Amino acid sequence: MEAPRLGNLYLEDPFLQGYLRAHLPAQVFAKVNIDLERFGARVRDEIAFLGRQCELNPPRLLHFDAWGQRVDQVTTCPAWKRLKDICAEESLVAEGYTRRYSSWSRIHQAAKLYLFAFSSACFASPLAMTDGAAKVIESLGIPKPLEEAYAHLTSSDPKTFWISGQWMTELKGGSDVGGGTETVARELPDGSYSLHGFKWFTSAADSDMTLTLARIVGPDGQIQQGSRGLSLFYLKIYEDGKLNGIKIQRLKEKLGTRAVPTAELWLDGARAHLVGATEKSISSIQHIERSTETRLGKD
Protein backbone atom coordinates (compact mmCIF):
# COMPACT_ATOMS: atom_id res chain seq x y z
CA MET A 1 0.00 0.00 0.00
CA GLU A 2 1.34 3.43 -0.93
CA ALA A 3 2.31 5.70 1.94
CA PRO A 4 0.31 8.89 2.51
CA ARG A 5 1.54 11.82 0.46
CA LEU A 6 2.00 15.28 1.91
CA GLY A 7 0.01 18.00 0.20
CA ASN A 8 0.50 21.74 0.16
CA LEU A 9 0.13 22.45 3.88
CA TYR A 10 -0.89 26.04 3.27
CA LEU A 11 -3.63 25.26 0.76
CA GLU A 12 -4.87 22.46 3.02
CA ASP A 13 -5.13 24.73 6.07
CA PRO A 14 -8.24 26.92 5.72
CA PHE A 15 -7.93 28.06 9.34
CA LEU A 16 -4.46 29.55 8.69
CA GLN A 17 -5.65 31.19 5.49
CA GLY A 18 -8.69 32.60 7.25
CA TYR A 19 -6.63 33.90 10.17
CA LEU A 20 -4.21 35.69 7.86
CA ARG A 21 -7.02 37.14 5.76
CA ALA A 22 -8.71 38.45 8.91
CA HIS A 23 -5.62 39.97 10.52
CA LEU A 24 -3.54 41.32 7.62
CA PRO A 25 -4.37 44.39 5.54
CA ALA A 26 -5.82 43.31 2.18
CA GLN A 27 -2.83 44.46 0.14
CA VAL A 28 -0.41 42.69 2.49
CA PHE A 29 -2.46 39.49 2.55
CA ALA A 30 -2.51 39.38 -1.26
CA LYS A 31 1.29 39.28 -1.36
CA VAL A 32 1.72 36.99 1.65
CA ASN A 33 -0.87 34.57 0.29
CA ILE A 34 1.08 34.14 -2.95
CA ASP A 35 4.35 33.58 -1.08
CA LEU A 36 2.86 31.04 1.33
CA GLU A 37 1.23 29.07 -1.48
CA ARG A 38 4.62 28.90 -3.20
CA PHE A 39 6.38 28.00 0.05
CA GLY A 40 3.81 25.33 0.89
CA ALA A 41 4.66 23.65 -2.40
CA ARG A 42 8.36 23.84 -1.56
CA VAL A 43 7.73 22.19 1.80
CA ARG A 44 5.88 19.38 0.02
CA ASP A 45 8.35 18.94 -2.85
CA GLU A 46 11.72 19.56 -1.19
CA ILE A 47 11.77 20.31 2.52
CA ALA A 48 9.80 17.23 3.63
CA PHE A 49 12.24 14.95 1.80
CA LEU A 50 15.22 16.70 3.39
CA GLY A 51 13.61 16.38 6.81
CA ARG A 52 13.20 12.63 6.36
CA GLN A 53 16.84 12.30 5.34
CA CYS A 54 17.89 14.15 8.49
CA GLU A 55 15.86 11.79 10.67
CA LEU A 56 17.47 8.78 8.99
CA ASN A 57 20.99 10.24 9.28
CA PRO A 58 21.41 11.80 12.74
CA PRO A 59 24.50 13.86 13.66
CA ARG A 60 27.75 12.20 14.65
CA LEU A 61 30.67 13.31 16.81
CA LEU A 62 34.29 12.62 15.88
CA HIS A 63 36.60 13.20 18.83
CA PHE A 64 39.97 12.51 17.18
CA ASP A 65 41.32 12.73 13.65
CA ALA A 66 43.49 10.11 11.92
CA TRP A 67 46.61 11.49 13.67
CA GLY A 68 45.18 11.30 17.16
CA GLN A 69 44.58 15.04 17.42
CA ARG A 70 41.42 16.01 19.27
CA VAL A 71 39.06 17.78 16.88
CA ASP A 72 35.56 17.30 18.41
CA GLN A 73 33.93 17.59 15.00
CA VAL A 74 30.14 17.44 14.80
CA THR A 75 29.10 16.02 11.44
CA THR A 76 25.60 16.51 10.08
CA CYS A 77 24.17 15.06 6.89
CA PRO A 78 24.01 17.04 3.62
CA ALA A 79 20.23 17.38 4.01
CA TRP A 80 20.69 19.24 7.33
CA LYS A 81 23.10 21.65 5.66
CA ARG A 82 20.68 22.16 2.80
CA LEU A 83 17.89 23.02 5.24
CA LYS A 84 20.11 25.75 6.67
CA ASP A 85 20.55 27.19 3.17
CA ILE A 86 16.79 27.10 2.61
CA CYS A 87 16.23 29.00 5.86
CA ALA A 88 18.35 31.80 4.42
CA GLU A 89 16.82 31.66 0.94
CA GLU A 90 13.32 31.88 2.42
CA SER A 91 14.32 34.62 4.91
CA LEU A 92 12.83 32.60 7.76
CA VAL A 93 14.70 34.78 10.26
CA ALA A 94 15.39 37.84 8.12
CA GLU A 95 11.70 38.42 7.39
CA GLY A 96 11.18 39.56 10.97
CA TYR A 97 13.93 42.19 10.70
CA THR A 98 13.78 43.57 7.15
CA ARG A 99 10.13 44.44 7.91
CA ARG A 100 9.07 44.87 4.29
CA TYR A 101 5.45 44.68 5.50
CA SER A 102 6.12 46.81 8.57
CA SER A 103 4.85 45.14 11.76
CA TRP A 104 2.90 42.61 9.67
CA SER A 105 6.18 40.96 8.65
CA ARG A 106 6.24 39.03 11.93
CA ILE A 107 2.92 37.40 11.09
CA HIS A 108 4.24 36.48 7.64
CA GLN A 109 7.38 35.05 9.25
CA ALA A 110 5.40 33.08 11.84
CA ALA A 111 3.19 31.56 9.15
CA LYS A 112 6.22 30.38 7.17
CA LEU A 113 7.84 28.93 10.29
CA TYR A 114 4.58 27.13 11.10
CA LEU A 115 4.59 25.46 7.67
CA PHE A 116 8.32 24.73 7.86
CA ALA A 117 8.44 23.24 11.36
CA PHE A 118 6.39 20.09 10.72
CA SER A 119 8.63 18.84 7.91
CA SER A 120 12.10 20.13 8.83
CA ALA A 121 13.29 17.48 11.34
CA CYS A 122 12.99 20.20 14.01
CA PHE A 123 15.38 22.61 12.28
CA ALA A 124 12.85 25.10 13.60
CA SER A 125 14.54 24.69 17.01
CA PRO A 126 17.94 26.21 16.10
CA LEU A 127 16.08 28.66 13.88
CA ALA A 128 14.06 29.92 16.85
CA MET A 129 17.23 30.36 18.90
CA THR A 130 18.75 32.29 16.00
CA ASP A 131 15.74 34.58 15.87
CA GLY A 132 15.91 35.06 19.63
CA ALA A 133 19.60 35.98 19.50
CA ALA A 134 18.94 38.51 16.74
CA LYS A 135 16.12 40.01 18.81
CA VAL A 136 18.41 40.38 21.84
CA ILE A 137 21.07 42.13 19.76
CA GLU A 138 18.48 44.41 18.17
CA SER A 139 17.00 45.25 21.59
CA LEU A 140 20.46 46.39 22.70
CA GLY A 141 20.71 48.78 19.77
CA ILE A 142 23.07 46.51 17.78
CA PRO A 143 26.27 47.50 19.62
CA LYS A 144 29.41 47.58 17.50
CA PRO A 145 30.94 44.29 18.81
CA LEU A 146 27.73 42.53 17.71
CA GLU A 147 27.20 44.18 14.33
CA GLU A 148 28.84 41.31 12.46
CA ALA A 149 26.79 38.70 14.31
CA TYR A 150 23.53 40.56 13.70
CA ALA A 151 24.25 40.89 9.98
CA HIS A 152 24.89 37.15 9.72
CA LEU A 153 21.86 36.12 11.81
CA THR A 154 19.50 38.20 9.69
CA SER A 155 21.06 37.40 6.32
CA SER A 156 19.10 35.97 3.38
CA ASP A 157 22.29 34.75 1.72
CA PRO A 158 23.13 31.07 2.41
CA LYS A 159 26.83 31.93 2.16
CA THR A 160 26.69 34.37 5.07
CA PHE A 161 23.73 33.14 7.18
CA TRP A 162 24.55 32.06 10.74
CA ILE A 163 22.75 29.84 13.21
CA SER A 164 22.94 30.72 16.91
CA GLY A 165 22.88 28.45 19.91
CA GLN A 166 21.43 29.18 23.35
CA TRP A 167 23.76 27.72 25.98
CA MET A 168 22.08 28.14 29.33
CA THR A 169 21.40 24.75 30.93
CA GLU A 170 24.02 23.42 33.34
CA LEU A 171 24.34 20.18 35.26
CA LYS A 172 23.40 21.51 38.69
CA GLY A 173 20.49 23.79 37.95
CA GLY A 174 18.75 22.49 34.85
CA SER A 175 16.30 25.18 33.78
CA ASP A 176 17.00 27.19 36.96
CA VAL A 177 19.68 29.37 35.39
CA GLY A 178 19.63 31.85 38.27
CA GLY A 179 20.53 29.26 40.86
CA GLY A 180 22.34 26.69 38.79
CA THR A 181 24.77 28.58 36.57
CA GLU A 182 28.33 27.82 37.67
CA THR A 183 30.27 28.87 34.55
CA VAL A 184 32.66 31.72 35.36
CA ALA A 185 34.08 34.51 33.21
CA ARG A 186 37.49 36.08 33.73
CA GLU A 187 38.24 39.39 32.07
CA LEU A 188 41.19 39.45 29.66
CA PRO A 189 43.51 42.43 29.02
CA ASP A 190 41.75 43.26 25.73
CA GLY A 191 38.35 43.54 27.43
CA SER A 192 37.03 40.18 26.27
CA TYR A 193 36.39 37.32 28.69
CA SER A 194 37.58 33.75 29.14
CA LEU A 195 34.73 31.36 30.00
CA HIS A 196 35.16 28.21 32.08
CA GLY A 197 32.37 25.77 32.89
CA PHE A 198 30.17 22.89 31.77
CA LYS A 199 27.06 23.32 29.63
CA TRP A 200 24.92 20.23 29.97
CA PHE A 201 22.29 20.59 27.24
CA THR A 202 23.28 22.73 24.26
CA SER A 203 21.06 22.42 21.21
CA ALA A 204 22.46 23.38 17.80
CA ALA A 205 25.95 22.21 18.70
CA ASP A 206 26.85 22.85 15.05
CA SER A 207 25.93 26.53 15.31
CA ASP A 208 28.17 29.42 14.25
CA MET A 209 27.81 31.43 17.46
CA THR A 210 25.93 31.40 20.73
CA LEU A 211 24.69 33.54 23.58
CA THR A 212 25.50 32.03 26.95
CA LEU A 213 25.46 32.83 30.66
CA ALA A 214 28.35 33.05 33.10
CA ARG A 215 29.32 34.73 36.38
CA ILE A 216 32.04 37.35 36.21
CA VAL A 217 34.93 36.88 38.62
CA GLY A 218 35.54 40.26 40.23
CA PRO A 219 38.95 41.88 40.80
CA ASP A 220 38.87 40.53 44.34
CA GLY A 221 38.16 37.01 43.11
CA GLN A 222 34.57 37.12 44.37
CA ILE A 223 31.61 35.80 42.38
CA GLN A 224 28.07 37.06 42.94
CA GLN A 225 25.51 34.27 43.25
CA GLY A 226 21.86 34.26 42.19
CA SER A 227 20.25 35.85 39.17
CA ARG A 228 21.88 39.22 39.81
CA GLY A 229 25.29 37.65 39.37
CA LEU A 230 24.61 36.43 35.85
CA SER A 231 26.02 38.06 32.74
CA LEU A 232 25.22 37.36 29.10
CA PHE A 233 28.04 36.67 26.66
CA TYR A 234 28.43 36.32 22.91
CA LEU A 235 30.97 33.89 21.55
CA LYS A 236 31.86 32.55 18.14
CA ILE A 237 32.12 28.77 18.06
CA TYR A 238 35.21 28.78 15.86
CA GLU A 239 38.17 31.13 15.80
CA ASP A 240 40.89 30.72 13.18
CA GLY A 241 39.27 27.50 12.02
CA LYS A 242 39.42 25.81 15.44
CA LEU A 243 36.94 25.39 18.27
CA ASN A 244 37.08 28.45 20.50
CA GLY A 245 38.13 26.90 23.81
CA ILE A 246 35.29 24.37 23.56
CA LYS A 247 35.48 20.63 24.18
CA ILE A 248 32.48 18.60 23.05
CA GLN A 249 32.06 15.79 25.56
CA ARG A 250 29.27 13.89 23.81
CA LEU A 251 26.09 14.23 21.78
CA LYS A 252 22.82 13.60 23.57
CA GLU A 253 20.77 10.50 22.78
CA LYS A 254 17.20 11.80 22.61
CA LEU A 255 13.82 10.24 21.95
CA GLY A 256 12.76 13.29 19.95
CA THR A 257 14.56 16.01 17.97
CA ARG A 258 17.17 13.40 17.06
CA ALA A 259 18.30 15.30 13.99
CA VAL A 260 19.23 18.35 16.08
CA PRO A 261 22.82 18.01 17.36
CA THR A 262 22.57 18.57 21.11
CA ALA A 263 25.73 18.24 23.17
CA GLU A 264 27.43 18.42 26.53
CA LEU A 265 30.16 21.05 26.26
CA TRP A 266 33.13 21.97 28.38
CA LEU A 267 34.13 25.62 28.09
CA ASP A 268 37.85 25.70 28.75
CA GLY A 269 38.94 29.25 28.08
CA ALA A 270 36.35 30.07 25.43
CA ARG A 271 36.86 33.70 24.38
CA ALA A 272 33.63 35.68 24.64
CA HIS A 273 32.32 39.24 24.70
CA LEU A 274 30.05 40.72 27.35
CA VAL A 275 26.60 41.57 26.00
CA GLY A 276 25.08 44.61 27.69
CA ALA A 277 24.93 45.38 31.38
CA THR A 278 24.91 42.56 33.90
CA GLU A 279 21.54 43.55 35.39
CA LYS A 280 19.89 43.20 31.96
CA SER A 281 21.14 39.69 31.27
CA ILE A 282 18.05 37.87 32.56
CA SER A 283 15.67 40.04 30.55
CA SER A 284 17.83 39.46 27.48
CA ILE A 285 17.69 35.71 27.99
CA GLN A 286 13.93 35.94 28.33
CA HIS A 287 13.84 37.44 24.83
CA ILE A 288 15.43 34.23 23.51
CA GLU A 289 13.28 31.91 25.60
CA ARG A 290 10.06 33.63 24.58
CA SER A 291 11.10 33.47 20.94
CA THR A 292 11.95 29.78 21.16
CA GLU A 293 8.83 28.78 23.08
CA THR A 294 6.51 30.84 20.89
CA ARG A 295 7.79 29.23 17.72
CA LEU A 296 7.92 25.58 18.71
CA GLY A 297 7.19 24.98 22.38
CA LYS A 298 9.97 23.89 24.74
CA ASP A 299 12.62 21.62 23.20
Image: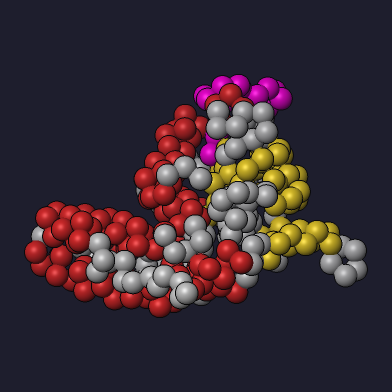
Question: Measuring 70% from the left and 52% from the top, which residue is drawn there?
Answer: 251
Q: Residue at x 23, y 58 (%)?
A: 16
107 is higher (above) or lower (below) than 51: above
Residue at the image point whose x is 15% and y is 58% from the top? 18
Q: How is the image coloured?
A: secondary structure
Q: Position of residue 177 (x, y in %)?
A: 56, 30
Of 66 and 230, nearer the camera is 66
Q: Magenta residues, as a range?
A: 215-232
Number of marks in picture: 0
Query: Between 177 and 239, which is closer to the camera in this rendering?
Result: 177
The residue positioned farthest toward the right in the image shown = 67
- Is residue 153 shown to the viewer in this render? yes
Question: Residue 66: x and y, percent?
Answer: 88, 70
Task: Give the residue at the far left of this rendering.
Answer: 26
Q: Would residue 264 be found to the left or right of residue 14 on screen?
A: right
Residue 163 shown in magenta: no
Whether residue 47 sits left or right of residue 13 in the image: it is right
Q: Above or below — where is 212 with respect to 245?
A: above
Choose between 23 and 170: the one closer to the eye.
Answer: 23
Q: Is residue 76 above or below residue 269?
A: below
Does residue 225 show up magenta in the picture? yes
Residue 31 at x, y percent in the picture: 18, 71
Left or right: residue 228 versus residue 264 is: left
The answer to whether residue 43 is visible is no
